[in-house]
Every structure is written in structure tokens, then in C-alpha cells.
Amino acid sequence: MKPLRDSPKRPPAARVLGGVLMLQLGLAGMLFWGDLGDGLRLPGFAPRAPGLTEPTRPGDQTRRFQPDRARPGGRPMPEAPLPKRLTLTVVEGGARVLLEGGIMAGDAERIEKQITALKPQPDGVILNSPGGSVSDALRLGRYFRDTDLTTALRSGDICYSACPYLLAAGTSRDVPDDASVGVHQHFFGESTLLPAFVAVGDIQRGQGEVMTYLDQMGIDPLVMQHALVTPPDEIYLLLPEELTRYRFVENADAS
């Protein structure tokens, strides 16, 4: 009998390298598809979060969230959808401006120019936004602080995702109890398939920048503990006592 011929084997180093490459492809693929849509969710057995309009209570604050389906909220258009990108309206005789709609790439520069051109210059900004571009929110927020603008929401207004970074920038901030402020995970940088560690690096740098920004604005960066564990297709709604705890609003009893 002829001896059995050994089957060809891949060198151990090659097998390890191949495994690492497949892991990177898998991670990057999830990041890529999540960036294209509303966030890729792995199959699970946990119940889906309640709808956005369901009331919240302590310990039950995570809700399903899609920016294009967020409840309109706010006045003077309670039944109308919010604009796809930030829209500026002068209100209160020029004392303040209203910014409504999603925060799109390029909105920071555009809104800065619009506010700078106003005469007289406004004292504050009213926000009603489902969020959007983090980098534009941080840039526009720094502009708010540099020009000593206050920020506020009205009864029924929403401020989700990247919008709380605009809210944080106000030299004073006003949020009625029936307004809604929410945070969740963000995507940072550009989508990429290879290598996965590049996308993860972008996320880590972005999170570091956000936490530094919040600290500079006088907000407790611990609010990010809620954002980091809430997927992009859900939103964690901050209760009034949390808005006080994280210093978005002042404690009325302490003033």
C-alpha cells in the first residue's frame, strides 16, 4: 500500500493572519452598513425599545429613533415635519433666532454667516432638531459660545443626537419639562471597509473630542455614558433631573 500523502496545511502564521483579516472585514462591514442606514443591529432576543412618543420614567428612557420619522414637535408647526437641514428664522423682533431641522454637513458655516449678517445681532438661539452631523454641531456650538448666545427649547421641542451639543454651547440654557433632549451613539469619520481599526480609531477620536467639548461648555461629560450604550437607531431621553445633574440646566433651588 502506498503511504497516505499528507494534506497541505497552511502555516500557523498565515492562518492567524487570515483570521484577523476576516475579523476586520466583519467589523468594518458592520460599521459600513450602519453608516449607510439607520445602524445595523445584530439579531437578539431583547424586546425592541418602545416608540418615541411613549412616555418615559426613570429606568425606562430608551426609545426607537429614526431622524426622518421623529415627531415634529415644537411651535409654530406642531403637525409639520422638520426641515431636512437647519433653517434659520428670526423671531421675537430679532432678539433670538429659531434653528429647526436636521444638522447637515456644511450647515455650521452657512448658519454662522447668516447669524453674523443679522442686524441687530440676536442674543439667543431656540433649537428644534433631530440632530445630524456631529462635526457641524461642535463647530456651530463653539460659534454660539464665542458670540455669547443663549440656547433654549420651547414647550414640545426636540433636541436629539448631535443637537444637545448646540444646546450645551449656550451661555445660559433653558429646557421646559415637556421639551425632549436625547443622546445616542454617533458615527465619526468616513465609512470604510478596510481596515476596521481605522474606523474604530475615528470613533475613539471623535468621542474624545465630544467629551472635551462638553467639559469646555460646562457640561458633565458623564452624560456620554448614556450615549455610548444607546444604538444609533434608538435614543436615550434625558429626564429633567438628569438635565440638571449633567448641568444642561441650572438647579432652580440652588439659584
Image (cartoon, grey):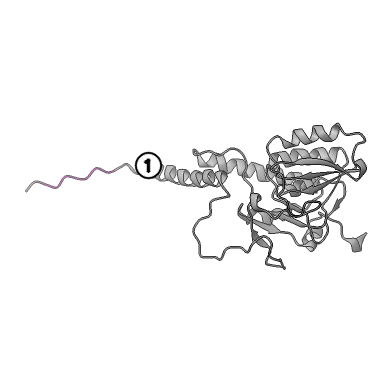
Q: Nearer the viewer, residue 229 or 161?
A: 161
- Location of residue 249 (image quadrant): bottom right
Say which residue appears at 53% left-offset and 51% top-offset: 40
Residue 48 in the figure: left or right of residue 13 = right
Residue 9, given in percent of the width and then of the height, sits at 27, 44
- Judging by the rendered image, the residue that carries numbered circle 1 is 13
From the viewer's perspective, is residue 20 above or below residue 246?
above
Residue 73 in the figure: left or right of residue 171 = left
Say which residue appears at 68% left-offset and 58% top-offset: 236
Residue 63 in the figure: left or right of residue 212 = left
Query: How would you rate the neighbour count of disc 1 (Cα within 10 Å): few for under 14, some for 14-19, many for 20 or more?
Result: few
Task: Indicate yes or no whether the magenta region holds residue 188.
Answer: no
Task: Indicate yes or no whether the magenta region holds residue 6.
Answer: yes
Residue 120, given in percent of the width and then of the height, sits at 93, 36
Does residue 47 show up? yes
Q: Nearer the viewer, residue 3 or 169?
A: 169
Magenta stretch, main secondary structure class: loop
Residue occupying the far left of the picture: 1
Which range is magenta? 3-9
Does residue 185 show up? no
- Location of residue 213 (image quadrant): top right
From the viewer's perspective, is residue 202 above or below residue 229?
above
* Quadrant of image for the C terminus: bottom right
Residue 117, given in percent of the width and then of the height, sits at 86, 31
Say which residue appears at 68% left-offset and 37% top-offset: 105
Q: Nearer the viewer, residue 13 or 89?
A: 89
Residue 28, given in percent of the width and then of the height, sits at 50, 43
**Callout 1 amino acid:** Ala
Say which residue appears at 57% left-offset and 44% top-offset: 35
SS at circle 1: helix
